[in-house]
Amino acid sequence: MIKRRCAIGVLAGTLASLALAPLAACSAKPAAGHGPVEIPFWSNQAGAGPAETKNMKTMIADFNASQTSYRVTWRTYPFDSYNTTVQSAAAAKKLPCLLAVDQPVVPNWAWAGYLAPLDLPKELTGQLIPGARGEYDGKVYSVGYWDAVLSVMARRSVLKTYGIRVPTLAKPWTGQEFDAALAKIKTGGTYKAPLILGDPSGNGASYPFPPILSSFGGDLIDRGDYQSAKGVLDGPAAQEFGTWIQGLAKRGLISTSTAQGSPFLDGTVAMAWNGNWDATAALAKYGDDMLFLPPPDFGHGIRTAAGSIGFGVTTGCTAEQKRGAQQYLKLTLDPKYIARFSTTQGVVPSTAAAASIAKDYAPGGRLSVLTELTQKHAQVRPATPAFPVIDTVFNKAVGDIIAGADVKSTLSRAASDIDRNISSNHGYRSR
């Protein structure tokens, strides 16, 4: 199943909060005196695992010890309520200086006036993989240390049993091959379903499904100007995609269970379109039998999802605080820190330099295919302030289609809902 904390889907609160006017937000000014300038830092990592907490604390401590001009102070909030907390702080003009922000939400927060563009060197931001760089209107607003990536998890022995070819990045399955493989596994009767593709209710669908939609030739919105979903979310290619996923459900080729846990690790499904967060556990259980495979090519190339938690500077910073915050980001983008996140947390390193020294993700490592997928085939979600609405609308559409709703009218309604929101916000033009 797609885990919301890694996959990042609906993160922008209620629809009513999505069209906030830009805010001249500000944080508390540093106290007068000769001490270091305080840089308040908020993140959505309350309750994170001990490795993640330790990694963050280490970076902050190292930065604070590396100079005497600034002092980063870190405060964490629960993941599920974090966005509401940030929105409330922005409304009260009490934003901190540094913020954790989910990459697909960056354009909305930049447009609303929460985030300021980063003035980091291009040679630094340019080395980041697509999912670790939050951009809007041609500017970088966030940078990250890791990303999550999806692959088809399978077992070599299962594919061999059913005479199914092991695909490669150079020669992935075609859509027809993939469907035939699922049908063979279904006929065998060993598994409750051949595949789990995502939550059949549509919850979080905007993470695992758009790469497949794009492989069919559709998309969530026209990325040329981000002004309309018509023709791309409800066009012939998107309808073919919708018919395909609905057909998988009707034929019993995908799991329709909404139970928590990992059906692939439980052994109840043969394959899973799943993320690296389950990779270590899968290797521990299945060992050398474990495969991480590229997605099928449905005619327009292979795609995997991208975009994870990054860190940006808010409009609440003073000029001096912003200088310190950007020094912090520069220091912590060192490959040694990024590789440590990868090695201890099982996440995809955000730079090639870090990947080269991260054990599993380095060339020849057990998860090196995930590194290559991320570097060469990642597709970020649309960089538009409308994304939170796109997210909500698409999630519902996918859930309805899997449940049996008419594909054409469902997608047409979804595209119209998105276009209506964009129009009501005057195209989300930069202000």
Image: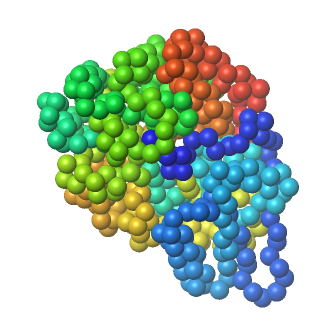
Residue at the location (74% across, 49% down)?
A: 84
Q: Position of residue 354 (x, y in %)?
A: 37, 64
Taking the view exactly as shown, the residue that stands out farthest to the bottom is 34
Which one is nearer the viewer's eye here, 346 or 303?
346
67 left or right of 6? right
Residue 23, image x, y percentages: 81, 49
Question: Considering the image in quadrants, where does the C terminus appear?
Answer: top right
- The residue that appears at 49% across and 43% down in the rendered structure is 260
Q: Toward the viewer: 281 or 179? A: 281
Residue 131 lies, with reference to residue 182, above or below; the image says below
Q: In x, y percent, where is residue 225?
A: 60, 29
Q: Is residue 152 left or right of residue 23?
A: left
Q: Quadrant of residue 344?
A: bottom left
Residue 293 appears in the rendering: no
Report whether residue 69 is seen. yes
Q: Is residue 364 left or right of residue 26?
A: left
Does 104 appear above or below 254? below
Residue at position x 54%, y 14% in the image: 405
| Residue shown at the point (65%, 37%) measured from the top left | 388
Q: Position of residue 81 (x, y in %)?
A: 69, 52
163 up-or-down from 68: above or below: above
User: Would you identify the image quadrant in which residue 73 lies?
Assistant: bottom right
Residue 221's image quarter?
top right
Seen from the viewer's position, the closer of residues 16 and 236 is 16
In the rendered image, the quadrant that contains the N terminus is top left
Number of labels in the image equals 0
Relative depth, front residue between 1 and 175: 1
